[in-house]
Image (spheres, rainbow, N blue to C red):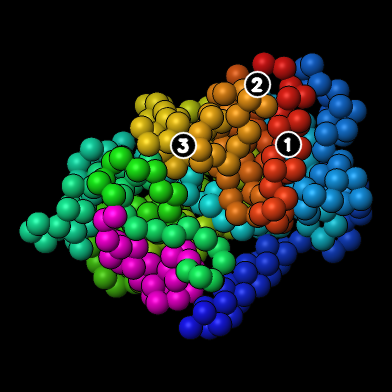
Amino acid sequence: MKIKLLCRWVGVVAASALLASASASQDVPANRYVALRDSDGVSSLALREAIDPLFDASADPATGETRALIVMRRGEIVAERYAPGFDAHSRFQSWSIAKTVTGLIAGLMVSDGRLALDDPAPVAAWRQPGDPRAAITLRELLQMRSGLQNVESWEPAPHSDPLEMLVGEGARDQAAFAAAKPLVHPHGGTFTYSSPTSMILTGIMTDQLSGGSRDPAVRRAAMARFLSARFSGPLGLTGFAPEYDESGTLQGAAMMHMTARDYAAIGELIRRRGQAHGHQIVSDRWFDFMTAPSPANAAYGGHLWLNRASDETLLFPGRASARLLAAVGHRGQYVLISPEQQLVIVRLGVTRDEDMDALREAMARLVRRFPS
């Protein structure tokens, strides 16, 4: 079973790599910046000194392979660079940056009155009399404190709930697989980072938009229409390509694909508290919730990482502003948002788990180049 799971996962990763490079230019020269300019208090030379090592394996091999990097200041790109074989049209897999997109979609649906943060989450599997999961709220799901069992690992052995969900026994209906997990902690009290939790959320949202239909085509079309009309369309995302499971549920845990500029646009939407192109796309009030520390982990908000000290954090507290926010994905995907510096930084690439500390230090150095 583990061998079969590993083979399926290798296939998913390979397919994602093909999608990422499908539109990549094959003649992008090394060391090429699409954009590089001075920004108030930061020279282009200072930016190069912080960015170039990320693309030069001989300079800092421990940070891994950076494939795309964008720095935005006050909504304008001041630095943009790609590795050979990638360009502004290339799509990159989101990994868990998708979770933050899921959090933004939830904000749209709460603002519409389709869902409520503190009502019991409308999951059919939890409605049986006496089921303690019936009390889990949307807020608790978004803050990763549902209390549900989960082993969050991207290695097939000894066990991985995300892999079982994506390519194993739960692949056909991933939200149902996730919702079937038992409660192992009282709901609301324990932080457990969980890709299945994000699939429960997208299952709920797809149910709401499709009127509860079980027809995969109906479910997928309903969510696709909503995303086009309310999210990717208004934001102007040119490469947004989310995946859906066989049941028609949006794969909101890890399987979205976008250009580097699309990721930057999402970071800018968060920095500007839901505003883009002169319109309030996501309610300003939603960001009061999304950026507030979870009661169970000060370094996590509503499907968004916070640069706070915690036993569980993926950022760099003490080495950059405590107000820094981030969407973070496996293998070193970052959308960093620093409101006080009016800054958004996107880094996409491949870094091994054992090298993540070096990458985080390099990203912290880049953030510190900019004055508050």
Q: Amino acid at mark 3?
A: Tyr
CA separation, marks 3 and 2?
20 Å
Residue 300: which disc?
A: 3
**Residue beneath the point at 69% across and 47% down:** 356
Q: Amino acid at mark 2?
A: Gln
**Residue beneath the point at 82% across and 38% down:** 51
Query: Whole-percent x and y of residue 152?
Result: 48, 58
Q: Nearer the viewer, mark 3 or mark 2?
A: 3
- Mark 3 surroundings: few (<14), some (14-19) or many (≥20) residues within 10 A: many
Q: Quadrant of the C terminus?
A: top right
Q: Is residue 35 or residue 116 the one in the foreground?
A: 116
Residue 341: which disc?
A: 2
Residue 265 visible, this angle: no
**Residue beneath the point at 48% across and 66% down:** 160
CA separation, marks 1 and 2?
18 Å
Residue 44, above or below 206: above
Q: Which residue is mark 1?
A: 361
- Mark 1 surroundings: few (<14), some (14-19) or many (≥20) residues within 10 A: some
Q: Amino acid at mark 1?
A: Glu
Query: Whole-percent x and y of residue 36?
Result: 84, 34
Q: Is residue 125 left or right of residue 59?
A: left
Q: Is residue 58 or residue 215 the one in the foreground?
A: 58
Name which quarter of the figure residue 142 lies in.
top left
